[in-house]
Image (tube, coloured by chain):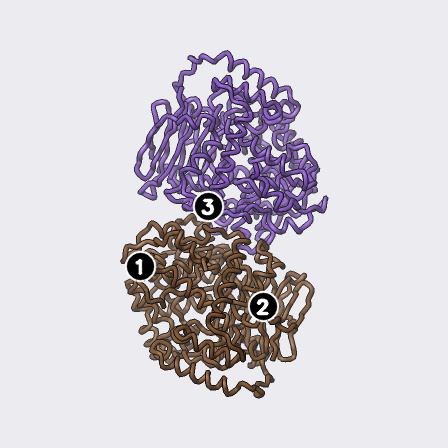
Chain colours: A purple, B brown
Amino acid sequence: MKKKIIEIDLTEKHIASLYAPDEFKMLGGRGLTSTIISREVKPSCHPLSADNMMVIAPGLLAGTVLSSSNRLSAGAKSPLTGGIKESNAGGNVAFKLGRLGIQAVKIKGKPVDGNALVGIKIDRKGVQFEDLSFLKGCRVYEAAERLFKKFGKRAGFIITGPAGEMKMPAACLSVTDPEGEPCRNLGRGGLGAVMGSKGIKAIIVDDGGIDTTHDSAKEKKKTIIKKFAGMLREHPVTGEKFPKYGTAMTLSAVNSLGALPTRNFRQGNFERAVAIGAEALHDTIVRRGGVHAHACMPGCVIRCSNKYVDENGDAVVGSLEYETLCLLGSNIGLADLDQVAHLNRLCNEIGIDTMEIGTAMGVLAEAGVVEFGDFEGIKEIVEAVGNGTPMGRLLGAGAAVCGKVWGVERVPVVKSQGMAAYDPRAIKGIGVTYAMSPMGADHTAGNAITLAVDHLDPAVQLEPMRDLNLKTMVLDSLGLCVFTGRVSLEQPQLIQEICMAYFGEITTFDDLMKVAGSCLKAEKEFNEQAGLSRLHNRIPDFMLKEKLAPHHSVFDIPDKELDRFYDF
Amino acid sequence: MKKKIIEIDLTEKHIASLYAPDEFKMLGGRGLTSTIISREVKPSCHPLSADNMMVIAPGLLAGTVLSSSNRLSAGAKSPLTGGIKESNAGGNVAFKLGRLGIQAVKIKGKPVDGNALVGIKIDRKGVQFEDLSFLKGCRVYEAAERLFKKFGKRAGFIITGPAGEMKMPAACLSVTDPEGEPCRNLGRGGLGAVMGSKGIKAIIVDDGGIDTTHDSAKEKKKTIIKKFAGMLREHPVTGEKFPKYGTAMTLSAVNSLGALPTRNFRQGNFERAVAIGAEALHDTIVRRGGVHAHACMPGCVIRCSNKYVDENGDAVVGSLEYETLCLLGSNIGLADLDQVAHLNRLCNEIGIDTMEIGTAMGVLAEAGVVEFGDFEGIKEIVEAVGNGTPMGRLLGAGAAVCGKVWGVERVPVVKSQGMAAYDPRAIKGIGVTYAMSPMGADHTAGNAITLAVDHLDPAVQLEPMRDLNLKTMVLDSLGLCVFTGRVSLEQPQLIQEICMAYFGEITTFDDLMKVAGSCLKAEKEFNEQAGLSRLHNRIPDFMLKEKLAPHHSVFDIPDKELDRFYDF
């Protein structure tokens, strides 16, 4: 089946379905969103203008039942960073898009009627606009419920929450998981605001009626599916730790490394880390009858996701992840799983990035607007985001804006994006990603925690981090979850076998790395044209001076060393 | 008398008084603040950190009674733009500093006790710290009153208002005028926040007891003082229009040119411009017994300032100026002098830039937060600035932040600074200054309105605007008001005569232009190091596309042409 690109022009109310050009053959996910945006979006455009484009692209392997291969990417010029952005998530939409043979959905323009609220429905019959005005201002979970009612249980959704409708720079996009909970977030960089600026409340994807029985490569695929799943199951991390503990297992590791953001990155240890750690989470879920070892996308054998429930066993949020446990936990002085879960659900309902909210809240606490650990006070401000009050909008604009508005010096951002849950003074490699990735302070572009290096030694980070950023781009393009990395990145031959089975041609890992390199440089070039200069590729000044306990370390990878990131 | 540089380190609680180095001989005002900052401040530092430096420098002619020669400059890395900033004003402080023989006051560091509120008192006996904790949170006019009580009527003050104490990026510094009203503002770029971050509530300058009777060049000076004053008095603009109408006379001119920012830069004409124009202002002041033809600094014969009074003849604000009449008038749909004057006084009390507030309010109205023309609603938000509520802090963070927080596309800023009261689509030359000046969208760096060119022709702006930016830097360095330009810039020989009389050596206008050129390039270099890239030297995208009535013109000076600004 030759793949298709859907082109939607909202200004012209026009939809076109085109065959994907040959040159996109090896481009999926972030590789494709960034390629299209860097070619077709004017870097100086306003991110909320008709000139910006939202590109939705499943990974190249989407639609298959190869384990962990159904990640969904979305990309645009970011209202948060002002640069190019890609964010990816699990859920069931990439799988459906893959089955429909859709390689990308490009959305440009803006409805002439600024108050319109539209949906884009994609199924095997084609693509059409839907009037979703009845969902105006609707929170995400209710919106999903009403969308299921209208479009049937077979559909998957990408939903813009109230935050996105209000065009907040930290607004995310919510993707339905296999059970239909809209909890898999394209979290970072304000993509929800771009969607909101285009008046899109939801993208509805229904793969009903697709026939995949005629597949000449079926046997070849079966073999590799089985082999890959087996390898993931056998690996102690992907096969045991992840299903049991999920991403929360990272918390004690990062805490031990002294890099756990605590009270606005004042400390690298949280004295109550155990209370929000993996074992506490696992035990609570098991005791209350929640779900662990949950697959966030169809057919994933790693199953690192969970469904957190309250003491009555009622659903709170799926899934409580490490980044949220830290940034809405230790970073704002909270050490109660129920409290973090409540805030997480609230953010999901509003459609706002838990990570940016956590970092921004840390900055507000630093400014004295709220006390660290004051759950009620914190909750009130997060509620305000949903209500669009001035305070809520401030938080929804992210950590950098909060810092500017309250005159705070200690603002843990790069390219105006709040840092992920790793302090770069104690895990210095992540500082390379924060500083140099075109994505801003986004751990998903290359997470140093997986590297076997001395995290405190500034001299040994650059090369492996550059390599990791490129490898991550390869996985993101294939749509393979980064958590497969422990298996998939260790054996380049495996990726080649997967490509052979699915694409019918020999694609070496080196080939994919070359493509990834070009994409990374295209992103960098876009950012430069968008006004992000060398100084935007820097860790904030306070982290170069203020020593982080317990290691009393600063971020000290020299600028010159950082600038070698793109020497490849 | 050899001039002195005062160096204050707040961290070390140390004060030093040094003779100014010879190389500073031709540097005063902006020339000196920018030279010091570009050499001594780390461009990547946080503007509110101890590493930033506040430099106060009167112009080179300060302390003399040469007409219009007592402008005061302050400079720092700007919390608003992130680049280098200088702002200058009249008032009586530069005169006093000049008489005390002080060429610059450099303030670095930060009190270790973050809650300290200090004063810096400068008189003929030296410089010392004062405890001003009793003025914490005090509004500007009351602060001035209490400072006069403490330090005597002979003193002049630079005061940080509540906005500066709260470190708002649009906070200004207030300087006392000859009558002691703290209404001459170092308005732009958030210098008040820098002062606030250093815990300084006021700088107190007392020139009592200075003996200037022994002056060997007295006669020479007398001759040039008389000659210069005569020329200013004879010129139809500086001798007649300015004393009668003040800067408000610009309003009808800009309105006729179709460049008067109206309702967030949606139109270039305001249908009720007459109501806030120069004649209405003059007539109201005269009828009510206010003051026109007021000198904002000692010995100025132009006297373009005024004291606006209410219908009972009671003081409201001195002085109602063009930029405020437009940006807090037509730009937010207000056409009532009393309303504008009230808002102006309110901003002065809070210590916040009327221009940035006007531009930001226009953006809020665009977002629907308040209605254009709703005086009560607008007033409430400006009051909120003083109270530091989230809404107030948002406004106090300026137009760019308001635009980001409310998802507004039409945000008239360059380098995150709100534009002055000239739409660059109809006065294209000002667009060269907005875009290319290191100062951001600041008309005081080179105001195209004085140029005799076709303001709509994109091809004829660059060269004269570059020239005007350099000449303005010359005047700013001398401390000569730009309004003398119609006389002083027309006759370069005159400047040479002035320099000869005051500095005792031949300094040609060309010499001064060379110095100005070096300063401008040093500022540019600082900005580049501070992360302001080529895209920051651009007019916002919407002004390149959206046609401005009545001329239906866009800003269309090509990027390439703009970039030639620094080819000299």
Chain bearing mark 3 = A
Looking at the picture, does residue B426 appear above or below residue A243?
Answer: below
Q: Is mark 2 on a helix, strand or loop?
A: strand
Residue B189 location in percent, x, y?
A: 50, 61
Callout 2 amino acid: Lys
Q: Residue tagged by mark 1? A: B456
Residue B201, numbered circle: 2
Q: Residue at x 66, y 46 (%)?
A: A556
Looking at the picture, does residue B364 appear above or below residue A415?
Answer: below
With B365 as the anchor, is A64 left or right in this view?
Answer: right
Q: Nearer the viewer's eye, disc 3 or disc 2?
A: 3
Residue A126 shows up from this direction: yes
- Choose between B279 and A441: the one closer to the eye: A441
Q: Quadrant of the N terminus of chain B?
A: bottom right
Chain bearing mark 1 = B
Residue A530, numbered circle: 3
Q: What element carries label 1?
A: loop
Rounded to the nearest angstrom, the CA distance separating label 2 from label 1 is 45 Å
Question: Label 2 near label 3: C-beta < 8 Å?
Answer: no
Chain bearing mark 2 = B
Callout 1 amino acid: Leu
Q: Residue at x 35, y 51 (%)?
A: B544
Residue A521 location in percent, x, y?
A: 51, 37
Residue A224 location in percent, x, y?
A: 55, 16
Looking at the picture, does residue A366 appear above or below residue A508?
Answer: below
Residue B332 shows up from this direction: no
Q: Nearer the viewer's eye, disc 2 or disc 1?
A: 1
